[in-house]
Image: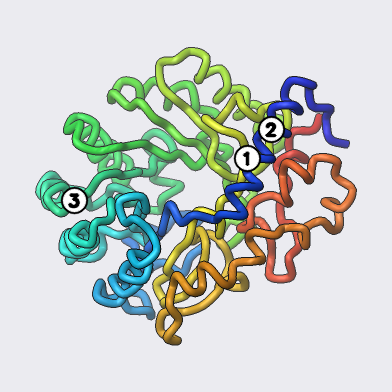
Amino acid sequence: MAERLSLRRRLALEMVRRLQDGVIEEHPLRQLFWECTLRCNLSCRHCGSDCKTVSSLKDMPIEDFLKVLDSVSKECDPHKVMINVTGGEPLMRPDLDKCGKAIYDKGFPWGMVTNGYALTPERYKRLLASGLRAMTISLDGIGDNHDWMRGRKGSFERAAAAIKMVIDSGEIEFDVVTCVNKRSFQELPRLKEFLIGLGLKSWRLFTVFPVGRAADDPELQLDKDQFRGLMEFIRDTRKEGRIMASYGCEGFLGNFEGDVRDGFYMCNAGVTVGSVLADGSFSACPSIRADYNQGNLYAGDDFMEIWNSRYAVFRDRSWMKKDKCASCKYFRFCRGNGMHLRDGDGNLILCHLDRLQA
């Protein structure tokens, strides 16, 4: 049974819900992810992708992705659409700076998500010269705990050095993201102090959803007490004001809504967020399974035509109101949870509100 929402929180959620309805109806493209490679230099325990040092799928040529950007430019101001380069590991592409420059020359701001392992000072300078405007680096623990999660000895030292380098440069919008598991949960206060010591201002934390390699790894899943403890840790850290911590974008969190993020929960996949995957598929956020792909570049589809004419499964989520969601009194606020938490048949894999119950 879901805990009762306070009156103040319910009123705020009702107001936000109406605003969200307008965004859904308009569905303005604001972020476009490009899965530029499936190759990776690490072997993360929680990875849900087919990422390896040598991938069976070749990297998408930048010329192909630029066709998508040309489509976007016909209907959107490119300066208002952020291109997020992801993978795999983007730094596995030796031409990444050239790709970034081509994106920037089209008028789009761009950023990247990286594990930081291959981010040398020389590489960073080239990326800055290519128009890089934002970056996220993953850090999942201190020392051996990060290496355990990332599957490669020495990855903590590389990531920490990269984080320090980017912070010290002061050149771009930057944050660190932490995947909280049973090991890292125990050291969150220590990790917080470590990041503050590096000078970090913005820190995102998220939890593993049971898909891919993480599905059968109990060490990656927090129990209910730990999950609630994570929400309390984020809330209290925000109150301290020494570093701006926030929980990831997934999951409706009941009475923690408004306390652990800058805004209230909404899954923007297919509403303001789209993606072009390594095989040319058009999706929403890259974490969503292929069952919900909407078109494909290599099938001759035009991205904006697809964005405007399809994506209904993302924007009208009434189909999610089944099974446990059918009787949930908070469905109007949650709208069925994140799209990446639905299996191929549309069944809910994980409910965040359930994890917060005593």
Residue 171 in percent (x, y) is at 19, 36
Q: Residue furthest bottom?
A: 299
- Spatial CA distance of label 2 from label 1 is 7 Å
Residue 114 seen in the figure = no
Q: Are marks 2 and 1 in contact (CB under 8 Å)?
A: yes
Residue 181 in percent (x, y) is at 56, 40
Q: Residues within 10 Å of mark 1 (few under 14, many from 20)?
A: few
Query: How many numbered tags mark residues here?
Result: 3
The tag earlier along the polypeptide, 3 or 2, is 2
Q: Which mark is residue 19?
A: 1
Q: Amino acid at mark 1?
A: Leu
Looking at the image, which residue is at 46% across and 56% down?
29
Looking at the image, which residue is at 44% across and 72% down?
303
Q: Amino acid at mark 2?
A: Met
Looking at the image, which residue is at 31% across and 46% down?
155
Read off the residue under disc 3. 131
- Spatial CA distance of label 3 from label 2 is 38 Å
Q: Nearer the viewer, mark 1 or mark 3?
A: 1
* Rendered view: 50 above or below 243: below
Which of the two residues, 85 or 312, is positioned nearer the viewer here?
312
Which element type, helix, strand or loop, lies under badge 3? loop
Residue 75 sits in quarter: bottom left
Read off the residue under disc 2. 15
Q: Amino acid at mark 3?
A: Gly
